[in-house]
Amino acid sequence: MSSYIWNEKMETMPFEQMQALQGQRLADCVRRMYGTVPYYTKRMRDAGLEPGDIRTLAELRHLPFTDKEDMRENYPYGTFAVPIEDIVRIHASSGTTGKQKVVGYTKDDIDLWSECCCRALAATGLSKKDILHVAYGYGLFTGGLGLHYGSERMGLTTIPVSSGNTKRQIQILADFKPTALACTPSYALHLADELETYGVDKSMLSLRVGIFGAEPWSLAMKEQIEEKLNLRAFDIYGLSETMGPGVSISCEAGDLLHIQSDHFIAEVVDPQTHEQLPEGELGELVFSSVTKQGTPLIRYNTHDLTRLFYGRCGCGRTTVRMEKVTGRADDMLIIRGVNVFPTQIESVLLNYGEVEPHYMIYVDRVHNLDQMEVQIEMTPTFFSDSIKDIEQTERKLYQDIQATLGISAKIKLVEPRSLPRSEGKAQRVIDRRSY
């Protein structure tokens, strides 16, 4: 596999030049939004700011933040910066609570998105010789259509399978011989588990690249997917609010994700103080999508936790890189005063050959005390072992998880294929506490 750089000018631009370009685009974005997007105009006025106050990237820190509540409060079109007749497509988030976050795209926005996805696909080593099996959902969710347009623009053979119907997915993987698979990491694992059910061995597949995202997943899960599907896995990042998949992607030189810095200005801020953090410090990821026309956003707090890194990568790109997102600040569980992320538990159980990477976390409050139970599927082979062996593994998992989290959790090994599967984003946590 040998990746190449799709847009060498932008992806290898010297850092100082990129910062100057970001400053110009930021100032332009603020001018476009001011007086056009009412909620952000008010936010700036309340902060005592006018468009002329923003001239360089250094002034970014003075601008107000935005978040998902702004999008919900201005549902459906209150965040649009252009008239509705200029909007050629609408996407919306898959949020489970409250109103959806609605995003509008102009024709230029679709072209921008396709360009970013071309850069992402190139970073994985794909070219027009490849066949891409897109198993992300199509529709209001941005996953499927974003990669689809980028794939077609690059000239790949594109199979728009969408999500669901696992039997059909596996038949297409075996018969059509795609060389790349794009879906959520949890669904990739589900596909791998189901191969045997339908009499397909991984040697019968032609996959060499996997493009997985839309949910947090650990490096340990990456290794599992690579082994089970015999491919190289890449982490793609994006969210509907900023554009969709293609905002950043990992490359063959490492697991850090390259941000398309000419279009998305990234910051990491302290969750409490909201002050910008220096390189390498963990905080909440904030994006300014400064070239978007339909729904530009300034300092949008994703609440995803990551670190930023600068400097030239071994692949030759100079764009800002972000660490793999392993959790969201607003998805974090607080159990008896301790911060817990599902991926911490995942990283432990993936070290055990006796269990599968399918698990659920249940949180209850009993007599005013938080209690957590982790249910983990056993492998079919281990399920047939003695009760004594199963109990011994439960005790080991209990000890390892306690050492990792700093708190105890009940561990329950359950029979294979007994936990719910997801064809989209996996739901790992059921919090049944009442406050």
Image (cartoon, rainbow, N blue to C red):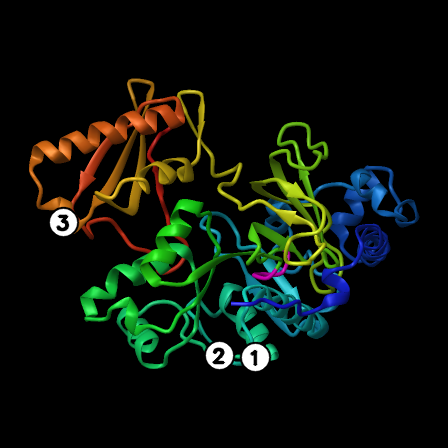
Which badge, 1 or 2, comes first in the chain's sequence?
Answer: 1
The kind of residue tagged 2 is Thr
The residue labelled by disc 1 is 152
Which badge, 1 or 3, comes first in the chain's sequence?
Answer: 1
Mark linked to residue 86: none
Quarter residue 407 falls in: top left
The part of the chain drawn in magenta is 242-246
66 and 274: which is toward the camera: 274
Describe residue 272's horizontal placement relative to residue 14 as left or right: left
The residue labelled by disc 2 is 158
* Foreground disc of the pair 3, 2: 3
The kind of residue tagged 3 is Thr
Q: Is residue 418 above or below residue 144?
A: above
Q: Are marks 3 and 2 in contact (CB under 8 Å)?
A: no
Describe residue 323's horizontal placement relative to residue 289 as left or right: left
SS type, badge 3: helix
Mark linked to residue 381: 3
x and y percentages locating residue 395 in the rendered image: 21, 27
Distance (Cα) linking label 1 and label 3: 43 Å
| Magenta residues, dominant SS class | loop
SS type, badge 2: strand
